[in-house]
Image: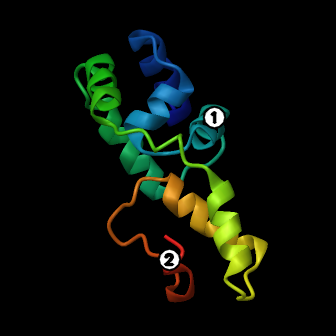
Amino acid sequence: MNIGKQIQKFRKNHNLSQADFALLAGISQRSVSYVESGRNVSSKNREKIEDTFKIENPVNRLENFSKSTKLPNRDFDVTDLVKDLASSGEKVTFGDVLQIALFKFARKEEGNKLPEKLQKFL
């Protein structure tokens, strides 16, 4: 049985969506869809998929994962950021605004850094 059919069988047996399987495997839902449709899978993703097949109780794992995952701060308002940037007198691109906003909005993970010229706007 090819790996795409194995994923479908695993998902059916555990009542998982493609998105659920992707979350467990640590790959994108699009990758799951591609593999299920018979497209080639990278060796890195194949390894992750095969590791996922070894999970004894994927539904519990998924529930524990969602309980322990911190959601990003959805109350972040970009208005103040835009005002600060506009009054700074510096040349700032729209891309810079997006980069700062996304950095403030998302969880700050280790190694996630803004360019120095943008750090003062945090």
Question: Looking at the image, which residue is at 55% across and 32% down?
Answer: 4
The Cα–Cα distance between marks 2 and 1, rounded to whole angstroms, is 33 Å
N-terminal of the pair, mark 2 or mark 1, is 1
Specify few, some or many for label 1: CA neighbours under 10 Å numbering under 14, 14-19, or 20 or more: some
Q: Is residue 61 left or right of residue 104?
A: left
The answer to whether residue 102 is seen in the rendering is yes
Which residue appears at 60% of the width and 32% of the height? 36
The three-letter amino acid code for the residue at tag 1 is Ser
Res. 98 in view:
no
Residue reaching furthest front? 87
Q: Nearer the viewer, residue 99 or 79?
A: 79
Tell me the kind of residue under disc 2. Leu
- Between residue 114 and residue 24, name the one nearer to us: 114
The vertical placement of 95 against 49, above or below, is: below
Residue at image position (31%, 31%) is: 65
Q: Is residue 21 above or below residue 97?
A: above
Residue in the foreground of this view, choosing between 120 and 39: 120
Q: Which residue is depicted at the point 39% across and 60% down?
A: 108
Label 1 SS:
helix
Residue 26, percent from left and from top: 42, 44
What's the colour scheme? rainbow
Q: Is residue 69 left or right of residue 103?
A: left
> What label sits on residue 114 in the rendered view?
2
Q: How many discs appear?
A: 2
Residue 53, how many percent across, how many down? 33, 31
Secondary-structure class at tag 2 = loop
Q: Which mark is residue 33?
A: 1
